[in-house]
Amino acid sequence: MNAIVIRADASAAQGTGHVMRCLALALALRERGVEATLAAAECPAALLERVRSEGLGVVRIASEIGTTGDSAETLAVAREAGAEWVLTDGYRFDLDYQRALRGGGLRLALIDDFAHLDRYEADLLLNQNSHARAEDYPGAERALLGPTYALLRPEFVDALRQRPVKAQRSRADRVLVTMGGSDPGNATVRIIEALRELRDGPSETRVIVGAANPHRSAVDAAASGLPGCRVLDPVKDMVPMLEWAELAVCAGGSTLWEMAAFGVPAACVILAENQAPIVADLVRRGMVCSLGWDRDLEAVSCAGALAALLEDGRRREYMGAAGRRLVDGSGAARVAAALAEGGQSPSPD
């Protein structure tokens, strides 16, 4: 295996995390001499630039996502690249789409989050979430399940090898707010408003606004009323942010595995349907606190939950330790090994 085509999309509403986790896997595959090409029907320009900056090729899919035209174009891209494998990450690649790719002579890998189909036809299926179950994926020849396979980019992996475990102070004074690449419902502003409600809030707050976030001016306006708050443009290297933060308020998607690996306790906002079971399971494990759906956020109740976390060092210590137990940083290397070895599941060490 020397080439793979990754079929994934993103928009201002969703999908940034999908493309970024695929990028993590592509970089791990490169370590094994496998070059990746991203085939996308839609993707924000800033995200495409990020992908290109890492040396990946980018090809546009002209057909509607998930159609027979899409699968035909993807097959053509794979043949042009000399790829044996296609990897898809998205919820519009149905059983017919899967059969079209495999029927075209390709091996198929799928990344999934919430088992939305009755059947799958794939050589390899990855669900990196802690609630994943093999019985939810009938038809998948092999499944890699759980945070053992969480896809972290090389900058996280390198930092984890050198980083000592950070002890939690009794009170948290540094809060990181990040809702991913888009935040269509503008949960960021409501979190800032909740922090403004606190009588004794954090000394410093850093708010990262994603490249596809359409609410930057509103975020700036809200942040101007919160002492010690800085609004930051998209950050290419999140490691310094995670090393700085004593508490994170984030979306309930792939970012959680980065927080977990670094032992950063997190309060989660659910932005999409596929995030709900992820957050529910991690709440059960004591790793995160849920603030509920973005559409239901209310400043006073959020403020109460955040105030309790800021003051409870013992709980934050437990949350951080629970995260580190789940994610060791080697997930992308394990998945890359499985692909390079023809779909065989490597030992999770």
Image (cartoon, rainbow, N blue to C red):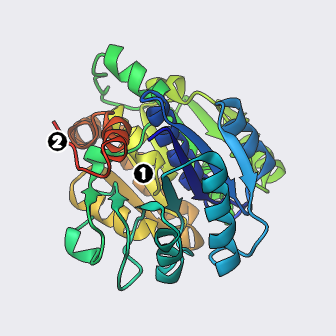
First-in-chain label (1 vs 2)? 1
Q: Element type at marker 1?
A: strand
Question: In front here: 75 or 54?
Answer: 75
Type of the residue with mark 2: Ser
Question: In front here: 41 or 246?
Answer: 41
> At x 41% / y 43%, what residue is drawn?
151
Q: Is residue 201 left or right of residue 342?
A: right
- Residue holding disc 2: 347
Q: Element type at marker 2?
A: loop
> At x 27% / y 76%, what residue is drawn?
136
Question: In front here: 328 or 248?
Answer: 328
Q: Is residue 276 above or below residue 111?
A: below
- Residue holding disc 1: 267
Graded by Cα atoms within 10 Å as few (under 14), some (14 to 19) or many (20 or more), the crowding at tag 1 reads: many
x, y percentage for residue 3? 53, 42
Q: Is residue 303 left or right of residue 315?
A: right
Question: In front here: 71 or 143?
Answer: 71
* Residues under numbered marks 1 and 2 in contact, where contact means CB atoms less than 8 Å apart: no
CA–CA distance between discs 1 and 2? 32 Å
Type of the residue with mark 1: Ala
**Of discs 1 and 2, which sits in the foreground?**
2
Displayed quadrant of residue 349: top left
